[in-house]
Every structure is written in structure tokens, then in C-alpha cells.
Amino acid sequence: MPLVTSTEMFKKAYEGGYAIGAFNVNNMEIVQGITEACAEEKAPVILQVSKGARAYANHTYLVKLVEAAVIECPDIPIVLHLDHGPDFETCKSCIDGGFTSVMIDGSSLSFEDNIAVTRKVVEYAHDHGVVVEGELGTLAGIEDEVAHDVGSYTRPEEVEEFVSKTGVDSLAIAIGTSHGAYKFKPEQCTVNEEGILVPPALRFDILEEVSKRLPGFPIVLHGSSSVPQEYVKMVNDHGGKMPNAIGVPESQLRDAAKLSVCKINIDSDLRLAMTGTIRKFFVEHPDKFDPREYLKPARANIKELVRHKLVDVLGCAGKA
Ligand code: G3H
Ligand code: 13P
Ligand code: ZN
């Protein structure tokens, strides 16, 4: 089947109590690892491309890689989505250039300016059969002093006005997740019986209030990597230095997927799997220099990581 929009996917996900995985793609091995897992698990998928990915790999290469995946995986629905579109022009370029979904990230603007730019993108996108994700509330990295301040969370009292005035098809909200591999400081965490650091819970109260105000409307979670400690250890055991890398517990993402969260964004976990695998390969095979030899196990581990997310976290295996 050709590339699709997320409309039908989100409707089924909302009703079925699961979420679609939105995985960031930057090169061929990542596209292959993700889509091979999705094809084998019969899972719908969103492949998303950031501004940084377009700058790195080039728009045309990424579109053609995704089109190749569509040909290789004819039985699963695939969405090509712009992640964190920074402005109207970037969104327009992706809409004109074959994407079926775009995000306009006006979350750093004033409420009024966010509405204005989002509405402008929605009008252009809908005229071209493309769907739009907007964002209210801000996610931040651990370096940002305001990362987990109350002011960063989405204000539920704003969501109805934002959605009705913009016409967006889905809404990303901030409930305590953040981008990258360092989502929580160790001092924010508690230690469980097994000595494992447990981060503070996501703000499910905000999610529930948003859902009450927007019944049936698909919600998106960014910054939802779980930072598997197995891969943090693999990085650190093979020359890397990633102390205190902590992600969102997968059980909380599973709970969110059962509610109104229909799209869960995962990028850092893929990066960790790829980097850990390649670091280990080089330590174990210092004489090897053929990129195919180290990219092959990296791609295989991305595939198994994605399979785990589809089956155990998102709940979307078998839903294609
Ligand atoms: O949310 C951001 C994604 O992880 C993409 O990251 O801008 O480094 O491509 P990037
Ligand atoms: P992570 O950094 O948690 O993988 O989040 C990715 C993301 O939100 C992409 O938009
Ligand atoms: Zn994001």
C-alpha cells in the first residue's frame, strides 16, 4: 500500500487502547531495522524525519529510503512524518515533497503565535491531504533549568481553544518526558529493592484532564525513550561515557498508550542501540574496517529493540 496519513491509525489506536510507534530515521540501516520489525510483527508505523535528519541525509534520500520500505513492506501502513517542524516553510517543503504528516512545533511561541502558525500549516496541509500535529507545553533537556518546572507542562485549560482554533489532527503534550538520554537527574529518582533508580512518575493527571476536554482526540508523547540500561552499559563497557543516563519507564508508556496517547516518539533508544553495538564491535574486532560488518549487527539490534517496543510497550503488534 502507498504511504498513508495517521488518521485511520490513530482512530484504531484510540479505540484499541494502544499507540503507534513514531521512530526517527536518519539512514538506511535505521529505516530497515524499524520496518523489518514492523513488517514481521504486522504493526503500523510512523517514520519521522527531523530538521537535523534532513540536513544530515538530504530530503530526497530520506523520502526515497522510506519509499523503498513501502515497497519492501507492502502489508503494513507507513506514515512519513516531519518531526518538530520549526516553521511554515519547512512544513510546506515536506508537504510538497511527499510527506503525509507534519508537526509544526510552535511550543516555544506565545499561545497566540503558536495558534497562528499552526493554523497556517493546517490550512496548507489539509488542502494537500496531509495531517498536522501541534504542540502545547514545552519539553526540555536536563540542562534547561526549567525542564521540569510546572510552567513547562501543558495547561489543560488551553487545549480545547488550541485544537478548535487551529484544526490540528493530533496534539503533543508535556507531562514530564523530555528529549535525549538524560531525562531525569539521579537525585529526582528513588531507589527500588533491586537498587535500580526509579524516575518520578509522568503527570497522568494532566493527561487525563486533557483527554476529558478532548474526547476521542489523539494525543502524542515526545521524549519517550526508555534509555535501556543494557545499552547504556554496552556503551560504557566499550569506551563510552554516559553516566546517569535515565529514561521513561516502559510500564508508564504502556499505561499512557491505553489512554488517549496514540503516538509515542522514540529516537534516543535507537541511537543507543546503534552506538552500543558499534562500540562493542570495534572493541571486539579492532582489525575490522568494513562498515557493512559493524552496521549489520547495529541494524539487527535496532530491529529487536523496535520489536520489543511494538509487542511489550506500544501494544500495536498485529494491528496492521
Ligand atoms: O526530538 C528530536 C529527535 O530526537 C530528533 O533529534 O534533531 O537530533 O534529529 P535531531
Ligand atoms: P527521545 O529523545 O526520548 O527518543 O524522544 C524523541 C522525540 O521526541 C522525537 O521527536
Ligand atoms: Zn520530540
Image (spheres, helix red, strand yellow):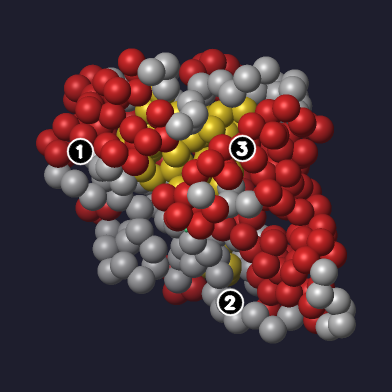
Is 143 displayed left or right of 160 in the figure?
right
Indicate which label's residue lies in the foreground, 1 or 2: 1
In the depicted structure, whether residue 46 falls above or below residue 105: above
Q: How crowded is mark 3: few (under 14 residues within 10 Å), some or many (20 or more)?
A: few
Q: Which mark is residue 242?
A: 2
Which image quadrant: the C terminus?
top right
Q: Where is residue 172 in the image (x, y as percent from the top left)?
A: 38, 38
Residues at marks 1 and 2 touching, judged by CB atoms closer than 8 Å: no
Indicate which label's residue lies in the foreground, 1 or 3: 3
- Report, in whole angstroms, how far the alpha carbon at label 1 lies from the one at label 2: 35 Å
Residues at marks 1 and 3 touching, judged by CB atoms closer than 8 Å: no
Label 3 CB-ligand 1 distance < 8 A: no
Residue at 34%, 33% in the rendered image = 92
Of the residues under marks 1 and 3, which one precedes in the sequence?
3
Q: Which residue is at the front of the view, 289 or 281?
A: 289
Give the residue number, with chain letter if any, for mark 1: 114
SS type, badge 1: helix
Q: Which residue is at the front of the view, 86 or 222?
A: 86
Q: Position of residue 158 (x, y in %)?
A: 21, 33
- Report, in whole angstroms, how far the alpha carbon at label 3 lies from the one at label 2: 34 Å
Label 1 CB-ligand 3 distance < 8 A: no
Q: Residues within 10 Å of mark 2 (few under 14, many from 20)?
A: few
Q: Label 1 is placed on what type of residue? A: Asn
Q: Position of residue 30 (x, y in %)?
A: 67, 50
Q: Label 3 is placed on what type of residue? A: Lys
In the orientation shown, which residue stands out farthest toward the front? Answer: 60
Of the residues under marks 3 and 2, which one precedes in the sequence?
3
Q: How crowded is mark 1: few (under 14 residues within 10 Å), some or many (20 or more)?
A: many
SS type, badge 2: loop
In the depicted structure, whether residue 223 falls above or below residue 64: below
Give the residue number, with chain letter if any, for mark 3: 64
- Report, in whole angstroms, how far the alpha carbon at label 1 lies from the one at label 3: 31 Å
